[in-house]
Amino acid sequence: MKGFNPKFTDFPDYILKITHEIWEERGIATLDHYYAPDIPVRFAEGVSIGNQRTKAGTLATLAEFPDRELMGEDVIWSGDDTAGYLSSHRLLTTGTHTGGGYFGPPTGKRFTVRAIADCAAINDQIYDEWLIRDTTGIVRQLGMEPKQFARDLIAREGGPETCTKPLNPATDVEGPYQGRGNDNEWGQRLGDILTRMMNTDFAVIRAEYDRAVQTEHPGAVTVHSWADTERLWMGLRSSFPNARFAIDHQIGREDPMLPPRAAVRWHLHGTHDGWGMFGQPTGAEVYVMGFTHAEFGPYGLRREWTLFEPVSIWKQILMQTGDL
């Protein structure tokens, strides 16, 4: 790869190795090289600008979970040496809550959740990023409840006026990466499936999903087959039935020894005006950033991984309703 250290054999190798070096080899100082000084990183929890804040966040997470491990499951990518690359990197991450921090006083409990990061890179450096970790899954495995955790978080951060604002169009920033992915058929197929579901055509699941599909959703939830997959997606869409859905980035790939697969980054923006996974409608304006990865087989979509962040959605609702 032009401009990258020759120790990296290809772009997935680059993403997997620098993640291991930064987190598990504790090479936090290497962020000064691997991350651009003014990188914007968009979390469901908010927006972070600059590499120094990325380093501080990494330190804080390792202080809270000193044995944290990040195991790369897949890197679904697009791009080239000239335009740069975009990786959608899915990780399985574990740790033990032995330090105090974002999740409160140490509980001594372990967690296993997934995270997905979309990282834009060129010349051996990541310069733009979108990231979701399954905070709701961590919260539940540490013995807490997502809505109450969001309520407590608002209080710890000084109340609705001063607390960190979750990602929304007003807090987002336009970063240097302007790509939209690629036009591979598998990305187009996943994008079409998601669009049909968000247009309330949930029959697409039985038409396009393998009956033995394994579906992974926020809260470290794993289900199988059609009915429970329908329930998960309906629970989200029915909460925001009039929200605008849009696809922000879409990749499809076919690689040796791997099934056809796809990665889509998407968002919902609208009001909480329906019953669903967020309870009684409140009319609160909500922005949902989401990621979906999929693998396809001979009988349809056989594995799906979707992440959005219910804790941040609850935070938006509670900040506006005053139910504190």
Image (spheres, rainbow, N blue to C red):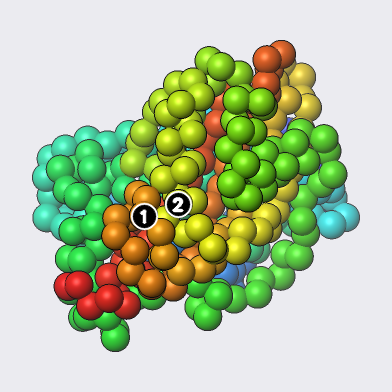
Q: Residue 137 — which label?
A: none
User: Residue at coordinates 45% horizontally, 51% vertically from top-left?
Assistant: 238
Local SS, label 2: loop
Q: Nearer the viewer, residue 40 or 288?
A: 288
To which quarter of the image does residue 239 belong? Answer: bottom left
Q: Which residue is mark 1?
A: 275
Amino acid under disc 1:
Trp
Q: Give above or below for 9 relative to 97.
A: above
Point out the image quarter for the C terminus: bottom left
Q: Earlier in the sequence, mark 2 or mark 1?
A: 2
Q: Which residue is mark 2?
A: 238
Please provide percent x and percent y for residue 1: 81, 43
Badge 1 element = loop
Q: Where is residue 287 drawn, in percent x and y?
A: 49, 66
Q: Is residue 293 above or below residue 145?
A: above
Q: Residue at x 24, y 47 (%)?
A: 139
> Could you classify mark 2 by the number of other residues whose Cα lies within 10 Å: few (under 14), some (14-19), or many (20 or more)?
some
User: Counting other residues with Cα less than 10 Å from the Cα at mark 1, is it few (<14), some (14-19), or many (20 or more)?
Assistant: some
Residue 48 visible in the picture: no
Give the Cα separation between the discs numbered 2 and 1.
6 Å
Question: For this rendering, which residue is in front, 318 or 124?
Answer: 318
Which residue appears farthest toward the bottom when viewing the image? Answer: 161
Identify which residue is drawn at 28% across, 44% down.
138
Q: Which residue is depicted at the point 72% across and 42% down?
A: 192
Q: Amino acid at mark 2?
A: Ser
Q: Position of residue 128 (x, y in %)?
A: 63, 63
Across and down, in percent, residue 284 comes to 38, 72
Left or right: 256 in relation to 318: right
Residue 186 quadrant: top right
Position above or below: 68 against 152: above
- Look at the image and tell me whether residue 158 can be seen: yes
Q: Give yes or no for contact between labels 2 and 1 (Cβ–Cβ under 8 Å).
A: yes
